[in-house]
Image (cartoon, rainbow, N blue to C red):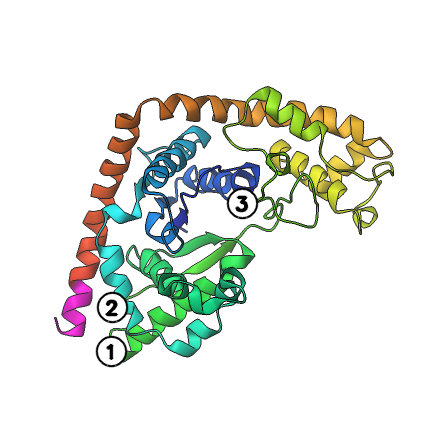
């Protein structure tokens, strides 16, 4: 069955191994299934829910697009663009904000986490962010959206908005209620310095993550210094209980090897972390160094990246504009 895929990544800089394993690697696999049509968006409108330096934001948009391409996303197969180039996203977001209910937004746990204790000082944009996400998806009649567990609640909101619009305006099936595609294995890659914390670009320690622009030496050094415990590696999955660093490193190895965790555990059973780190460093360098090299090469040609984003935006705009015209007809504009 053919799927219409939509997903987006915020251009906040320093995409890392967690982003690659948890999202981008899956984007490439979905693209390479000829039954799928895929749209991948650099969601720059989402990025400004918090204050951004304009010069750095422009740089980050290009870096995210370059990383997409270097990782294997093909702009001839998939539509790749940045959100702000397609006005329908902002327009649909306002219309859908008049359909969504306050109670629905008040239940969004991610706003509470990001806003923290002083939520009165958070931007309104951060609060209504999930409605813009719904607009992103619904404009393209996406049937499936690859999301992490932390975004699943937002996708459920997209479904609620779609269904309410269809019901309110007596337009059955006008908006497609999208289904989540949740990666079952290795969806969350943890910090190299703390196996209980997700790998994050906001972590002050560079040693906590492997950036997709890191050199081979940087990658090897970070894995060499990754936190471990004093035990040998276990011979079954139960042995990973309460050993988050062991689980994380074995998980990274499994994902990049495209093999089940059980096979990786068998390979390193009874061995020391030094054995795992040596082979893992070689594997990460093998998989990530070409991405790093190609990303840095692409970033030297800003005109080329901008053209890919503009061409992608033209294709996206053609789809989204038709949808927004029909939305306006339905609501009486």
Q: Nearer the viewer, residue 34 or 213?
A: 213
Q: Nearer the viewer, residue 143 or 284?
A: 284
Observer able to see residue 19: yes
Secondary structure beneath label 2: helix
For label 3, the residue is 202
Quadrant location, the C terminus: bottom left
Secondary structure beneath label 3: loop
Which label number is shown at residue 170?
Answer: 1
Q: Nearer the viewer, residue 271 or 54?
A: 54
- In three-dimensional space, the C-alpha distance between marks 2 and 1, rounded to whole angstroms, equals 16 Å
Closer to viewer: mark 3 or mark 1: 3
The residue that appears at 26% across and 27% down in the rendered structure is 303
> Is residue 115 placed above or below 81 in the rendered structure?
below
The residue that appears at 25% across and 62% down in the rendered structure is 92
Q: Which residue lies furthest to the left in this view?
A: 333
Residue 219 is situated, as x and y percent measured from the top left of the image, at 61, 26
Residue 305 is situated, as x and y percent measured from the top left of the image, at 30, 30
The residue that appears at 82% across and 40% down in the rendered structure is 229
Quarter of the figure with residue 173 = bottom left
State if disc 1 and disc 3 touch (CB < 8 Å).
Answer: no
For label 2, the residue is 95
Q: Which of marks 3 and 2 is nearer the N terminus?
A: 2
Residue 318 is situated, as x and y percent measured from the top left of the image, at 19, 48
Secondary structure beneath label 1: loop
């Amino acid at each position: 069955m053919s799927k219409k895929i939509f997903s987006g990544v915020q251009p906040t800089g320093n995409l890392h191994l967690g982003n690659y394993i948890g999202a981008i690697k899956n984007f490439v696999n979905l693209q390479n299934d000829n039954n799928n049509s895929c749209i991948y968006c650099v969601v720059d409108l989402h990025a400004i829910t918090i204050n951004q330096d304009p010069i750095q934001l422009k740089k980050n948009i290009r870096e995210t697009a370059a990383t997409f391409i270097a990782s294997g996303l093909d702009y001839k197969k998939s539509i790749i663009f940045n959100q702000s180039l397609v006005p329908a996203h902002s327009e649909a977001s306002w219309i859908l904000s008049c359909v969504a209910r306050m109670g629905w937004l008040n239940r969004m746990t991610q706003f509470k986490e990001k806003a923290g204790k002083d939520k009165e000082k958070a931007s309104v944009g951060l609060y209504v962010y999930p409605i813009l996400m719904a607009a992103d998806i619904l404009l393209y009649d996406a049937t499936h959206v690859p999301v992490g567990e932390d975004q699943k609640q937002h996708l459920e909101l997209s479904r609620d908005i779609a269904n309410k619009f269809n019901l309110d305006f007596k337009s059955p099936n006008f908006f497609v209620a999208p289904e989540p595609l949740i990666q079952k294995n290795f969806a969350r890659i943890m910090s190299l310095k703390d196996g209980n914390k997700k790998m994050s670009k906001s972590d002050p320690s560079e040693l906590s993550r492997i950036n997709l622009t890191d050199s081979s030496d940087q990658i090897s050094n970070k894995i060499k210094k990754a936190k471990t415990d004093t035990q040998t590696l276990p011979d079954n999955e139960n042995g990973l209980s309460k050993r988050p660093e062991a689980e994380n490193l074995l998980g990274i190895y499994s994902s990049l090897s495209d093999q089940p965790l059980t096979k990786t555990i068998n390979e390193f059973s009874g061995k020391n972390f030094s054995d795992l780190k040596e082979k893992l460093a070689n594997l990460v360098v093998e998989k990530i160094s070409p991405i790093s090299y190609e990303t840095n090469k692409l970033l030297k040609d800003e005109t080329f990246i901008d053209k890919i984003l503009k061409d992608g935006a033209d294709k996206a705009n053609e789809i989204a504009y038709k949808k927004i015209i029909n939305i306006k007809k339905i609501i009486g504009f």
